[in-house]
Image (cartoon, grey):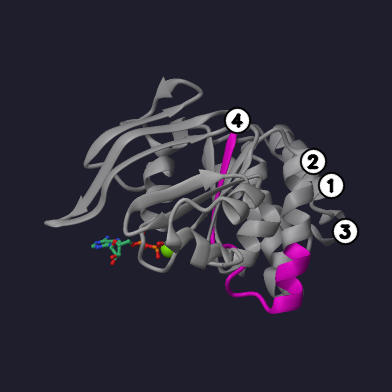
Amino acid sequence: MAEVRLTSVQKSFGNVNVIPQLDLTVKEGSFTVLVGPSGCGKSTLLRMIAGLEEVSGGSIYIDGVDVTNAQPSDRGIAMVFQSYALYPHMTVRQNIGFGLRLAKMAKDEINQRVEEAAEILQLGPLLDRKPKQLSGGQRQRVAIGRSIVRKPKVFLFDEPLSNLDAALRSQMRVELAELHSKLDATMIYVTHDQVEAMTMADQIVIMKGGEIQQTGAPMTLYNQPNTPFVAEFIGSPK
Ligand code: ADP
Ligand code: MG
């Protein structure tokens, strides 16, 4: 588990100032949902935390360590990509262990970690299948498995359920909540879906136009919205 802290983070693409100045503390061990309309800067923020995008200004700390200029692999962070990022020609076992093989980890250690992850994700009986022999939910779990084996302190999810149907989406919400309670990890979950935010988060961060409108527990935002935008977005009673 680790705290993630952003201080005066700023991001421009060319002369477009996408994130003017942003401060955020994500509590250690929390399931924090970052929510806001399309184009407000959620993915950009997540990619900067992961180190996939450079900040234009400000600092990022993980567990109090300044990682602003650290390589993605040195941050103790895993970004969970959507299930379509699986390799079709590899088995579930090979897909889950792929990153560890790249990192030249010993075979026994890889096998042990893959099996641990498969156990947590209930993929044990499916380890020898190829992605096309799996359901959408199983594929999503394999994508998550690839992150779990690296034992990150922080998991980042960027709209991982957006291309699943409604039934599977609600099943995966439950599974992700269970995963959070099984793993000692901080999770930052990005969505533009208010329902997802309200049901999954213990802390919600509401963004608009590259700025944080309000941060708090779901019911706090619902009952005490700071701005008309938050009230409208969360659906607070008028
Ligand atoms: P969200 O994930 O909330 O939908 P993004 O973080 O993807 O929003 O994008 C925020 C803004 O930054 C958008 O206006 C988008 O067009 C712009 N943007 C994102 N990535 C780039 C890029 N690589 N180059 C230029 N503009 C970008
Ligand atoms: Mg996005």
In the image, 48: left or right of 76? left
- Please provide percent x and percent y for residue 71: 37, 35
Within 10 Å of disc 4 (Cα), the crowding (few <14, some 14-19, many 20+) is some
State the residue position of label 1: 119
Q: Which residue is mark 4?
A: 28
Q: Earlier in the sequence, mark 3 or mark 2?
A: 2
Which residue shows up at 52% across the image and 53% down it? Answer: 225
Label 3–label 2 contact, CB within 8 A: no
Residue position marked by numbered label 2 in the rendering: 116
Asked which secondary structure carries label 4, the reply is loop
Q: Quadrant of residue 10?
A: top left
Is any part of residue 142 visible from this angle? no
User: Residue 56, located in which quarter of the rendered image?
Assistant: top left
- Closer to us: 82 or 186: 186
Identify residue for label 3: 125
Query: Is the Cβ of the residue at disc 1 closer than 8 Å to that at disc 2?
Result: yes
